[in-house]
Amino acid sequence: MPQMKLRIAIQKSGRLHEDSIKLLKECGIDINNGVNKLKTEATNFPLEVFFLRDDDIPQYVEDGVADLGIVGENVVLEKNRPLRTVEKLGFGKCRLAMAVPKSMEYSSIRDLQGQRIATSYPVIVNDFLRKLDIQAEIHEISGSVEIAPGIGLADAICDLVSSGSTLFMNGLKEVETVLRSEAVLVSNDKLSPGQQQLLAKLQFRIQAVKKAKNNKYVLLNAPNDKLPEIIGLLPGMKSPTVLPLAEEGWSSVHSVLNENDFWDIIENLKAAGAQGILVVPIEKMVV
Ligand code: PRT
Ligand code: ZN
């Protein structure tokens, strides 16, 4: 009988390495940091971790050498392998964008018609241009794409952008977003029923970690006559917890706030008479 475990491929070094390990650790999975190693075993979960170049991860997962992988969506789409995206992971966020020299007049994607575009993502770029019916010459280069216009190799580039400072420093301006990307957990369709159960367990933990990151635990004090208004401002998981304070006529209110509307709600709470507002990170959240 085959040994029941999952094998996950993560980036050996680079932008996704640390966050991938951190996510596994936050899921309560203990692994030795395997820099310069090919693989390692988790000590408290049936998981083997392979350290690979990100470009190789889709193929390893498709071939069943690994069952799961953590890799950027940009790589998954470029490699065009039949993989299942199990979960978006919320880190490694970036966009694949077209950029042209600052001096170029650019009004629409039509301006790229007949131009030479340098990129490490020929599959995605071809697909993007084909859908828009633009013909362009694609030059595939593997690194330092941003210098291509400056040395006369291309008229435009399509590359990953996060802060935009690389484009800026090379005299380029971003003109089109081709794709928004983040790290994802992918799997193949070869998992045994037992492995699928293990994956469900892992996914449950990942979701709890992700939810916790997007939420904060908030504690505040309020005079009792302000409570209805304050409670009305709080979404909470069910409803806020209200506890009497030692000081007569005052209560402590506890609730959970989502990061997206966090600051608005805090301002409104203050305006409604809340005092001593404490905001605490949540480690895991299961709803
Ligand atoms: O060795 P290996 O092949 O595994 O790594 P790699 O060099 O191919 O990839 P790596 O580690 O650079 O990136 C891994 C993944 O991180 C990418 O596939 C993306 O999914 C994600 N990611 C997120 C990024 C960026 N942000 C990013 N900014 N990958 C690359 N960049 C580069 C970009 O190519 C450009 O050179 O950073 C520069 C732009 O950054 P800003 O901040 O100046 O805009
Ligand atoms: Zn790579």
Image: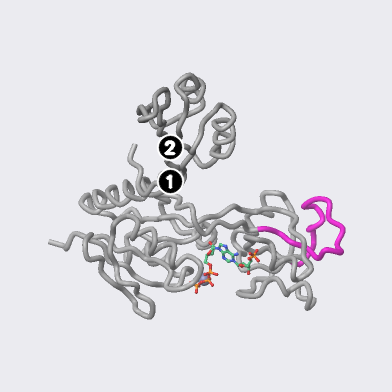
Q: Amino acid at mark 2?
A: Leu
* Lateral position of residue 44 relative to residue 244, left or right: left
| Residue positioned 43% across, 67% down in the render | 18
Q: CA distance from mark 2 to mark 1?
A: 8 Å
The dot on residue 280 is 1
Name the residue tied to disc 2: 219
Disc 2 crowd rating (10 Å Cα; few below 14, some 14-19, many 20+) is many
User: Would you place residue 73 above or below residue 229 in this image?
Assistant: below
| Residue positioned 56% across, 26% down in the render | 272
Quick check: marks 2 and 1 in contact, CB under 8 Å? Answer: yes
Give coordinates of residue 59: x percent, y percent.
42, 66
User: Would you place residue 152 above or below residue 246 in this image?
Assistant: below
Magenta region, residue range: 97-116
Give coordinates of residue 13: x percent, y percent.
45, 73
Ligand 1 rendered quadrant: bottom right
The dot on residue 223 is none
Examine the structure image and report whether residue 112 is included in the region drawn in magenta. yes
At numbered mark 2, what does the secondary structure look like: helix, strand or loop? strand
| Residue positioned 26% across, 62% down in the render | 47
Mark 1: is the Cβ under 8 angstroms from ligand 1?
A: no
Of the 4 image quadrants, the one containing the N terminus is bottom left
